[in-house]
Each structure stands twice: as structure tokens, then as C-alpha cells.
Image: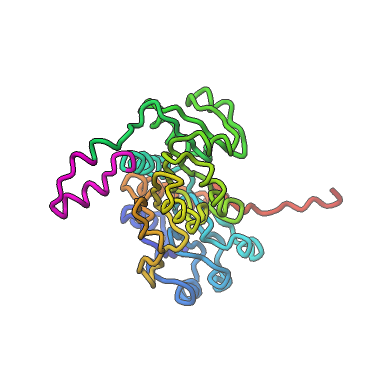
Amino acid sequence: MKILLADKIPDFAISRLKSMGCEVFSRTGLTGKDLADAVAETGCEVLVVRSTKVPRPVLEAGHGLKLVIRAGSGFDTIDVAAADELGIRVCNCPGMNSVAVAELTIGLMIALDRQIVDETDDLRRGVWNKKKYSSEALGLKGRTLGIIGLGCVGQEVACRAAAFGMNVMYYDVIRRPELEKQLGVKYSRFDDLIEEADFITLHVPGGMQTRHMIGRRELALMKPTAYLVNCSRGGVVDETALAESLRCGDIAGAALDVYELEPTATDPEFKDPISHEPHLYGTHHVGASTHQAQDAVAEEMIRVIAAYRDHDEFLHCVNPEKVHVVGG
Ligand code: MLT
């Protein structure tokens, strides 16, 4: 079986695939036509991607292409509708990097409350500012965290926040009573969460359904002392509205790991204007990027490939084949 890896995956996973008898092609950093050409030229049956986008022309170029695997949980970078039309299955590796994303989320919350980035920035410029930084942090204990989206990542954030003594409320399109008990979290209506939380963290999938879920209206409803954290997908927050809210003090600050304008392999410059906002802390879409998480994702990717190769099964398929019921 021919497998094209369009992003870097750990070496052990490549060795394992080879020892399973797969022919592995590693072509990282390709986009658009170059990726389509690689898909056509290798004749791959399986395409594995992490950040690389898979638009329709890439799928159309794959004459023997049967499976696209997203080495992560989100699949908004893949044209799933086109894959569906072409009879190509798309599978992901959900839950494998949830702990890593949750750890970064908690880290960003503490960084915001303690202004760690500004403190470091001052130190690097030789400025000692104990007076300022001693008077502003409120602490996490006893404060309210609002989690939007109680999936795998949201749950990991909830139990870590509980360990910090925070009160945790959540909003999700599906209420999860069993988890409320297990994690000690309280379900809340969307607007109530926005109004009451001291920290709001987003853990929802990207795409049209969640686009600008946090916009001007929501930011205006937040407490002026509240912080927003987004380690999910860039488009979930309206960044123009966020920049305005940060500037006029509608909220105390925000931390983003994901952006509306993320660089690509061919154009790595970060051009998103949100980076210039002073009350904004930012990381480089690295929520999932710990060795532990990437190894776990790679293990799962191998499991998906083995299930397909050995049993013609598509694990974690996000576009399962539709069964047509005749006369049904
Ligand atoms: C995910 O969807 O799981 C993350 O975006 C993965 C990643 O950054 O590779």
C-alpha cells in the first residue's frame, strides 16, 4: 500500500509503516498544485496530513486515493464534501492531543492573570517592575471558568481547572449530565456563561457552524475583568471585534493559539494584525504540539491505516459511505 505523508510525522511511525509492508513517501511543505502532483505521481492510496490543506484539486489528482487521514482532530482543512463526492473517506485521530491542548489552555490562563509575557518582556529590556506586577493578578482559585464545547479537550480543561479550585461552567450544543457529575461542572446557557465567566475558553470545531461564535455582541457581554482564550480554531473568534474590545477595555485580555490568518508552508510570514494588540498573548498554533501528543496521534494514525488495510474498515471516519435503502 502506498502512503503519502504530506506533513512531518515522528520517525518511529514511518519505520512502523514500512515494517507493515507499506511504501511510504514523505513530501512535506507542498501546497496546491505541487501537492496534487505528488498525489498523482506517487499513486498513493492513503494521504496523511497535519496542517497541510487538502482542497478538491488535490483529491481529484488521486486516481487511486481512497483515504485521507488528518493527523489531529480538526478536519476543516480538508474538503470533505469533495472527498465524499469522489468516494474518498476522511478519517481523523480524535482525542489523542486533547491533554496537550488543555495544558496550553491552562498555561495561557495563568499567563494572562500573571501577565507573564509582559513581565518577561520587561526583564529582557532590563526593566524591574515588581510594584506594577504585584498589584494586578487576581488568581484562579474560586474564579469562574466558562468552557464552550465539552468534548475531549473541554473535559481535560475542566478537570485541570477543578484542580486549581475554579468553579467550572460549560455550554455545549448537547447537554452532558453524566459529565456534569463526574467533572463537577455546571451547564449554562450560552449568554449566561458569557456574562458570568472570569475566563472563557473555546473548544469547538471550526467551520461555518462556529464561525465568529464570539463576536462584537458576545465580547460586549463579557465582564471587563474577564479573559478569553482560544486554542480551537481561528475563525471561531471575530478578530476585528476582538481587537476593538481589547482596545476599548471591554475585556481585560485574550490569548490565542489559532488565528483567522495563519501562515502556510509556502508563505510563513505572520500577517494577522491581531498580533499588535497589547492585551493579546499569542502562541503559534502549537496546542497539539507536544512529543507525547504527536506520538499518540501517530499511533492512532497507524491504527487507522491498519484497520483499513487489514479489515477494509474506516476508523473515526467523518464522511462514512451513505447506505442507500432501496424502497425505504
Ligand atoms: C487538531 O486539530 O488536532 C490540531 O489542530 C492539530 C495540529 O495542530 O496538528
Query: Residue 292: x, y in percent?
Result: 33, 44
Query: Magenta stretch containing residue 107, yes or no?
Result: no
Query: Residue 275: x, y in percent?
Result: 37, 59
Q: Is residue 115 left or right of residue 277?
A: left
Q: Is residue 88 left or right of residue 74?
A: right
Look at 38% across and 42% down and name the residue there: 105
What is the basis of the colouring in this image? rainbow
Dominant secondary structure (helix, strand or loop) of the stretch shown in magenta: helix
Q: Which residues are magenta?
A: 112-132
Check the image and report above or below for 35 versus 287.
below
Q: How many marks?
A: 0
Check the image and report above or below for 294 versus 260.
above
Query: Residue 136: x, y in percent?
Result: 29, 37
Q: Which residue occupies the extreme right position in the image?
A: 327
Q: Which residue occupies the extreme front position in the image?
A: 248
Look at 24% across and 40% down and name the residue there: 133
Check the image and report above or below for 324 versus 176.
below
The residue lying toward the viewer, choosing from 313 and 87, is 87
Query: Residue 157: x, y in percent?
Result: 42, 36
The residue lying toward the viewer, choosing from 270 and 223, is 223
In the figure, residue 112 lies in which quadrant? Answer: top left
Look at 15% across and 50% down and name the residue there: 127
Check the image and report above or below for 6 versus 148.
below
The residue lying toward the viewer, choosing from 88 and 229, is 229
Query: Magenta stretch containing residue 125, yes or no?
Result: yes
Q: Is residue 156 left or right of residue 289?
A: right
